[in-house]
Each structure stands twice: as structure tokens, then as C-alpha cells.
Amino acid sequence: MKQDIDFILEGWEFKPGMVQARLVQTRGRQVIQMRVDLGVLQLETEGRPDGTQPHGQDTYFDYLREQARMTAKGKHSFALSEEQCQEADREFVQFYHRRICWLALRNYGRAMQDADHTIAFMDFVKGHSPSEDYTQAHEQYRGFVLFQRTQAAAALQVEQSKPDRAVDEIRSGLEQIRTFFAAYDMEEQFDEDGMVHHLRNIEKSLREQYDIGETLREQLDRAIAEEDYERAAKLRDRLKSRP
């Protein structure tokens, strides 16, 4: 069996600071290949990126949730063991790699799905962490994951010709990032954060390019703030009825 990967790397020069990804058809399925400085990573597009099913579950997160549920039946609290922490870290890294690949490939829906998996896993870790150090080792990246999810959500709405909803996605994402900053007493750093600046620039560009004033969501928020509940009810109906 041919074992060298020279033919895969030929003509695909590594470029530092750039996510290089491509979809490849192989053995009856499609996989992602990601160029790295020492070669290439190959990721599955479905389930866990490495294609395994830990303890028969789709992901290690699914396995841990089941373990926590079973432990709760015995009236005990569930805390991650050292080995479970290591395996959880492996899955976080795998989903990170696939998420940035989906963004590079402009498959924004799949990028959002992988971001949602990571955020839910972070929530689980926060609730079952063996130590504050382990919690913080993951929480420090929450803002970044929220940032990438917001980028993907906004891009998907633009792709679907709904720029006003892209603005709403950005505003929603910014509020989630603000909440994250506030939770760790860093709210004063929010306005100076590079990710926040980037999202605000995208919002500004969208408003200018598509001549967007107040979105329906913004009008609803203002009506509620002004206690104009009759107008708020009408705006809610319009939001629910739009395609």
C-alpha cells in the first residue's frame, strides 16, 4: 500500500497565518483536508472529526453527558476525572480545527453547528469541572467561539439575502460576548476588544451597503423599552410571519 503523502501536498504550499482547507471525495464519503506546516490533517464531516465513536456515542461530550445523568440517578455529583479532562480537551481541539475549516470553506451552517457543540461542551465543563484552573483554561476561549459563531451566523444570513437579519445576528452575538466579559469583571475591556471592533465594522458595512436603518428586531426592542406594548405586539407578529 502506498504510504507517502507527497502526492497530496504537491502544489499545496503551506501559508502561515492562513486556514487552508479543501473538501475531498474518498472511499465513498467526503472529508476535509486541512494543510498544516508539517503535512495535512484529515477530518470527517459528520459526527466527531476523527471519525471515532467514544464508548459507542457520537461524541465524547455525549458520553460524558450520559455519565453525568447516570451519576445523578445515584444522588451523587459528577466531576470530570483527569483522564476525562484529557479526552474532553482532545474533542475541543478537534472541533476547533473543523470549525475553522468550515469557516474557510464558507459553509457557515456547519461552522455554527460545531460552534454550538463547543459552547454546550464548555457549559458542561463549567458545571462539572474538577478545578477552577481547568474551568478557566476553557472559559478563556468562550469569547472567541462566540465571535466565530456570530461571524458564521451573519454570513449565512447575507448568503440568504437577509442582510437585516445579519445585523441582528451581530448585535445578538455582541451582547453574548458582553455578557461573557461581564461575568469575569472585564466589561471595561469590551469596547477595546479586537473581536468586538471587527463585528462592529461588519455591522457598519452591512448597514451602509444595504441601507439598513432599524431592523424589525431593533424596532421591537425600542418599543419594549418605551413600554409601547401595542406596537411591540405588532412587531412580534411581523417577526413571526416573515419567511
Image (cartoon, rainbow, N blue to C red):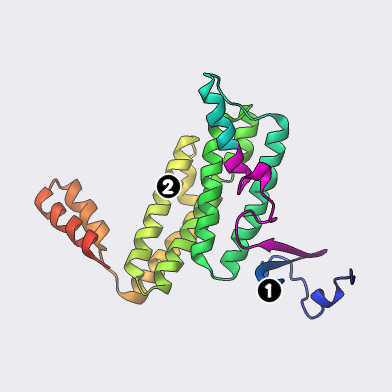
Q: In percent of the image, x 55 and y 41: which residue is there?
A: 122
- Residue 28 horizontal/vertical position (percent): 67, 72
Disc nearer the start of the sequence (1/2) = 1
- Residue 121 horizontal/vertical position (percent): 56, 42
- Residue 67 horizontal/vertical position (percent): 59, 32
Q: In the figure, is residue 213 to the left or right of 149?
A: left
Q: Is residue 204 above or below residue 94?
A: below
The residue indicated by pointer 2 is: 176
- Residue 136 horizontal/vertical position (percent): 60, 35
Please give the label number shown on residue 24. Answer: 1
Q: In the figure, is residue 133 to the left or right of 76?
A: right
Give the mark count: 2
Say whether residue 114 is visible. Answer: yes
Going by the picture, which residue comes out furthest to the top?
75
Q: Which residues are magenta?
A: 36-63
SS for tag 1? strand
Q: In percent of the image, x 59 and y 42: which residue is there?
A: 61
SS for tag 2? helix
Marks 1, 2: nearer the viewer: 1
Q: In percent of the image, x 21 and y 54: which residue is there?
A: 220
Three-letter residue code for mark 2: Gln
Please give the label number shown on residue 64. Answer: none
Asked if residue 204 is among those painted magenta in the image, a careful observer would answer no
Categorize mark 2 by other alpha carbons within 10 Å: few (<14), some (14-19), many (20+): some
Categorize mark 1 by other alpha carbons within 10 Å: few (<14), some (14-19), many (20+): few
Q: Is residue 181 above or below residue 25?
A: above
Q: In percent of the image, x 63 and y 27: which residue is there?
A: 131
Q: Is residue 226 above or below residue 199?
A: above
